[in-house]
Image (cartoon, helix red, strand yellow):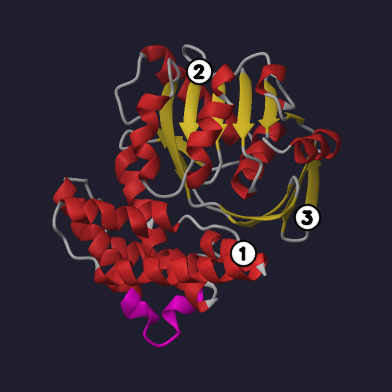
Amino acid sequence: MRFVIVGPGALGCLVGAKLAEAVARTDDVLWILDHDSKRADHIHRKGILYEKFDRQKRYPVNACADPRGIERADVLFLCVKSYHLEAALEFCRPLLQPRTLLIFMQNGIGHLDLRDRVGEAVPAFGCTSEGATSLGAGHLRHAGDGTTFLGFLDRPDDTSRVLLAKTVSILQAGRLAASVSENILTRLWAKLFVNVGINALTAIHDCMNGELLTIAGLGQEMREAVREAEQVAVAKGIPIESDPYQATVAVCKSTARNISSMRQDVLKKRRTEIDAINGAVIREALLSQIATPVNDSLVKQIKEIEKNYSTQRSR
């Protein structure tokens, strides 16, 4: 099998490291595809540097900045930020052949509508609770263990179903806790609830995940933001398997010292994924005429933060 990962950020490098560990013992092939030729060259020469606790390991990988340099892709992981997704689809289009399994790994739910933009490739979707932080080109810190689910929104053909199962087996061989989900839409919304409750608040208040439960007032704001998202899900008929707020509290506790992805973006003065997370809740709520005052406020505050550091860069 030939695996391609598009986007060597924190998640892309984590998936890359786990796949590299597994394919090293097989005839399978792994490529990293990056729009940044300088970074791709660095990763091709140096590999992926994986850190966890006090341990480091370097995984050699193939990397390039031209999709035409890769023979083909049996499985392609899209690990770019949600706002780069459409550009990334165009970038890797030469690799989207009939029966290519294209796995979307974005936060939020905005990408669910793009499955009709993949040509003859077969779209699948993933969500993960793994914690990872990018420390530089091809360098990540694995900050916390989680679970990764992969699945289809539409009924797949037998070939695609088998290919996804093989992919999960290879991730497991690389010591990533992964499984096939028959209800991936429920999983995606469950992760959305958690992201809605944690990401923006930690970015706005510059705090660790666990501090949302100890700083006065933030726990209640988190509860209200999640409840608004839950109302939207109910209106859309999305199955909910467990209490979204309690699940968010549990994640805050289990990742108490983690830095959320949105806080990482704000600390690095990068664009956030607020539109794909809290913003997506607001857009869906409008269709059902549901009020979302807390999410409205969170989006407004994050947009103001982004505006401020954009203004600082232009001075």
**Residue positioned 45% across, 39% down in the render:** 126
In the picture, residue 32 is in which quadrant?
top right
From the image, tell me which residue sits under label 2: 100
Q: Is residue 257 visible?
A: no
Viewer-proximal residue among 262 and 50: 262
The magenta stretch is: 209-221
Viewer-proximal residue among 122 and 214: 122
Percent across and percent down for residue 67 are 66, 22
Q: CA distance from mark 2 to mark 1?
A: 35 Å
Viewer-proximal residue among 212 and 69: 69
Other residues around mark 1 within 10 Å, as few (<14) / some (14–19) / many (≥20): some
Using residue 189 as the reference point, say whether residue 38 is left or right of it. Answer: right
Is 213 included in the stretch rendered in magenta? Answer: yes
* Secondary element at tag 3: strand
- Look at the image and tell me in which quarter the C terminus lies: bottom right
Amino acid identity at mark 2 = Thr
Q: Earlier in the sequence, mark 2 or mark 1?
A: 2
Percent across and percent down for residue 130 are 54, 51
**Residue positioned 49% across, 52% down in the render:** 129
From the image, tell me which residue sits under label 1: 269
Q: CA distance from mark 3 to mark 1?
A: 29 Å
Percent across and percent down for residue 174 are 64, 36
Q: Earlier in the sequence, mark 3 or mark 1?
A: 3
Give the main secondary structure, helix, strand or loop, of the magenta stretch.
helix
